[in-house]
Image (tube, coloured by chain):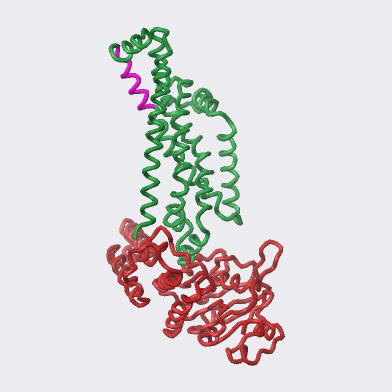
Amino acid sequence: MKAFDVFYQQFITKGGYKTVLLGLLTTLQIAIIGLLIGIVLGTLIAVVKVIPKYKKLPKALNAICNVYVGFFRGTPMVVQLLIGYFVLMPALGISLDAVVVATIVFGLNSGAYVSEIMRAGIQSVDVGQLEAGRALGLPFSTAMLKIVIPQSIKNILPTLGNEFIVLVKDTSIVSFIAVTDLTKAFRQIGDANYEYIVPYLFLALVYLVIVMLITYLIKLMERRLKRSERKQ
Amino acid sequence: MKESSNIIEVKGLTKSFGETEVLKGIDLDISEGEKIAIIGPSGCGKSTFLRCLNCMEDPTSGSIYFDGVDIADVRVDINVHREHIGMVFQQFNLFNNKNVLQNIMLAPVHLQTKRLRRAKIHNFFCKLFRKKEKMIPIETTAERIEENARARAMELLNRIGLADKADVYPSTLSGGQKQRIAIARALAMNPKVMLFDEPTSALDPEMVGEVLDLIREVANDGMTMVIVTHEMGFAREVADRILFMSDGVIAEQGTPEQVFDHPQNPRTQQFLKCVL
């Protein structure tokens, strides 16, 4: 039990839990804001992809979206983080907090994945719904926002939940650009005494609990959505 | 530019999907209050033609004058004209995420409030630049638009006898009820023309009657209508003019008596022999 005592001392007595809580906050902040950015970007890209392509502008937009999705799906997120922090920031001559950079990279990355989720969700809604809206004189954007996208959410939600879980777990790589997240916080506790067994097991447990909580929340939301459909 | 008696004038309309030419040059004048039924074998382009009339399908060439404006021209804001062209679909296409009342109110409320918002913004800038003479008079408020739309929707629901279903979601309704509500939704826009795309083809036989009754009622109110249908008896009863389409052209047209009792074109004769 020596290893556990060492961990306990470092975690409680020496105030390691403060770092861990801050790390947890950073982790959740990056994942949640990243997902929100991803949803907005992903929806926009998905809409561009489902617009009929007989005009020039959608074609050009579509090409841009393809490049974007191709890059962010085709390279590891660590590499994207490193490029964002060590290449783009100096090149553009701006200095941002590492957490901000990580959030932006996570947002851009999840945007690429969410766009595919959204596209599938939008295409799962019957074309007639859009047509009926357009036939009443509603513009494409309104018909999409008020009729098609709300209906697609039910199909999208489970997959989007998965994406969120992936994002939460992937935040463990942000220490590459010196962000103190959950993983780094626990590593620091281990570093203090070169005793890593308990901190890392505990770390895994914390991630597991977070993911289980998210899974539960998603199930709850799904049930709510289904109920609204059955109403009356 | 156009003589006023014709609400729709179609000139040389063609439509191709890729290599296949579905409509091969259609000319048609529809005068106000006229009821036209389009019949013909499946795949002859009836539905495509109907969907071209409100540019659901963009015509490949030709022009469609609605109220004197060529809506086939891509520079025209088609949404403004679609408000005046009601459309009823084979598959009803009620908005599944809205209840019945919202289904009927959505478009009128949205479009009118948008117009109101635009007018307000316009007036704001007029005030800003001291050009009060250019201001648009505003006679309504967002609340009143909503109220009026609700009243109109309830009036329509009462008329079709479904007022008790106002708060219900479409998934709980029968096909006949859905289609009647879809017709009410189109009527709520006070359209000048109604297009019916096989309104009874997806219905169980026992529900066809109630939908046809409603369409007949709308017809008796003097609405201009174009109906694609397989209900020959109904077409004969309601329509002023029957169009028989075949292979992307209007093969024969005339009064119901002419087309049904004395068809001239051999294709019409053959088709009618099969369906009557």
Image quadrant assignment for residue B51: bottom right
Measuring from the top left, give residue B169's x and y in whole percent.
Answer: 38, 62
Q: Nearer the viewer, residue B190 or A166?
A: A166
| Magenta-colored stretch includes residue B49 | no
The residue segment tinted magenta is: A14-26
Image quadrant assignment for residue B243: bottom right
**Residue at 31% over, 64% down:** B132
| Magenta-colored stretch includes residue A17 | yes
Classify the position of the C terminus of chain B by image quarter: bottom right
Q: Does any portion of residue B38 appear in the rendered image?
A: yes
Left or right of residue B118: residue A53: right
Measuring from the top left, give residue A53's x and y in whole percent.
Answer: 60, 54
- Does A96 sit above or below residue A39? above
Q: Which chain is green?
A: A
Q: Nearer the viewer, residue B53 or A73?
A: A73
**Residue at 64% over, 66% down:** B60
Q: Which chain is red?
A: B
- Dominant secondary structure, magenta: helix
- Does B206 sit above or below residue A121? below
Q: Nearer the viewer, residue A4 or A55?
A: A4
